[in-house]
Amino acid sequence: MDQEYDVIVLGTGLKECILSGLLSVDGLKVLHMDRNDYYGGESSSLNLVQLYKRFKGSETPPESLGLSKEYNVDMIPKFMMANGTLVRVLIHANVTKYLNFKAVDGSFVYNKGKIYKVPATDVEALTSTLMGLFEKRRARKFFIYVQDYDESDPKSHEGLDLNKVTAREVISKYGLDDSTVEFIGHALALHRDDSYLDKPAMDTIKRMKVYAESLARFQSGSPYIYPLYGLGELPQAFARLSAVYGGTYMLNKPECKVELNESGKVYGVTSEGETARAQKIVCDPSYLPDKVKKVGRVARAICILSHPIPDTNKSHSVQIILPQNQLGRKSDMYVFCCSYAHNVAPKGKYIAIVSTEAETDNPQVELKPGMDLLGTIDETFFDIYDRFEPVNNPLDDSCFISSSYDATTHFESTVADVVAMYSKITGKELDLTVDLSAASAAAEQS
């Protein structure tokens, strides 16, 4: 271990593993360490026994729930957009060969006590029960504008400079109702609050186009895909990639103390009396607690079901977004559901996870609107965890710290953090112009 490396990565969470793989592909000499004896960190997947041990102590799982080894329950459950940034990263890094994906059955939004399929195109707008007849026509015109918009073709802009006009101004041009604006912003563009309405519309339009393009890729009921056996496969896939390109992995390394010189700049990591030297450190917040601040908490309920979520067309896998205004909250609530169809539970069992940015100390009460959608629940595990963000300047100390995972059930914010960190670490942009047919093939095989 007493060697010189270009980068030392601490923690084998998904973000850290992606960065380790990308940096190794770039030809950097990478040492990747973890204090745990397993991959995944906070984004690991647990079997049933591990789940009980973590949340219920010594309690033994009942036999009615099935075999422990058939469970792969993600601690940070997130679907990936079929045409989104994470899929592009997977293809760029050529890790799709280690993974098999399956399309997610449905994408829904909560409105006035009921859930509806999210309409994402002009055709879906006309058939959606979420809107009345006249609103459907207005929404259809807006969706056609979004679908036809081409940044390089002024004829498709309809006189609007989306880098200047706000999302609110673009939407108001079509006279859409507040409830329509709500599902467009939160369930299609995947914004986490309404501040986007007063920002340039370009970001929102691009997000909507990615959603619609992802939906069209597999002709399924949602724009999302998800790996067979859960997200625990992803960190290991990137670990294999890093190893292929010369990266060194060391699990079960206690302490992993980051060493700083007199000027506060990193020079290495010490574990078990040995110091590995490097000019840059990449880690999750737990390795450098003095350089991060608490920015919130995530409340979640992990539920085991013996049936699909009601009113989702008997879908084996779904995302449901409950917009904040529907619940009188400051933040959205998310429902993630997967099942034996993705090999994350025994035959006939479903894993539903309800999550939100915690606004109280009582997750049981706070998560009730999402849990009420699930029907009969076999078992529930409640949890609250803190979210942290870095406060250091990497230019000063060469410590590159990821942000904690948020409550969303999609990867858009997570991978945005990874791409931004990659640029800071390397000083260059990550080239994500890739052929998406590789992901299509991997999903279609499944």
Image (tube, rainbow, N blue to C red):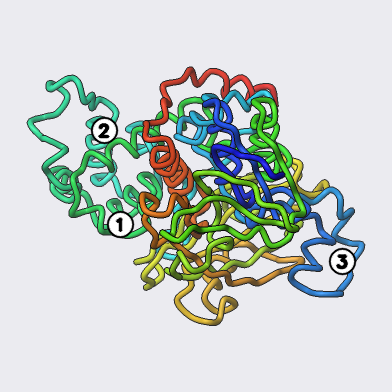
- Locate the C terminus and report the quarter of the image it occupies: top right
The residues tagged by marks 2 and 1 sit, at their Cα atoms, a distance apart of 18 Å
- Locate the N terminus and report the quarter of the image it occupies: top right
Q: Secondary structure at mark 3?
A: loop
Q: Earlier in the sequence, mark 2 or mark 3?
A: 3
Q: Against 38, is 127 above or below?
A: above
Mark 3 or 1: the one toward you: 3
Whether residue 250 sits left or right of residue 317 in the image: it is right
Q: Amino acid at mark 2?
A: Val
Residue that numbered label 1 is attached to: 179
Q: Against 438, is 131 above or below?
A: below
Question: For residue 240, which quarter of the picture?
Answer: top right
Q: Which mark is residue 146?
A: 2
- Camera sees residue 10: yes
Where is residue 328 shown, x and y percent of the image? 37, 73
Residue that numbered label 3 is attached to: 61
Q: Residue furthest right?
A: 63
The residues tagged by marks 3 and 1 sit, at their Cα atoms, a distance apart of 42 Å
Q: Which mark is residue 95?
A: none
Q: Residue furthest front?
A: 262
Q: Earlier in the sequence, mark 3 or mark 1?
A: 3
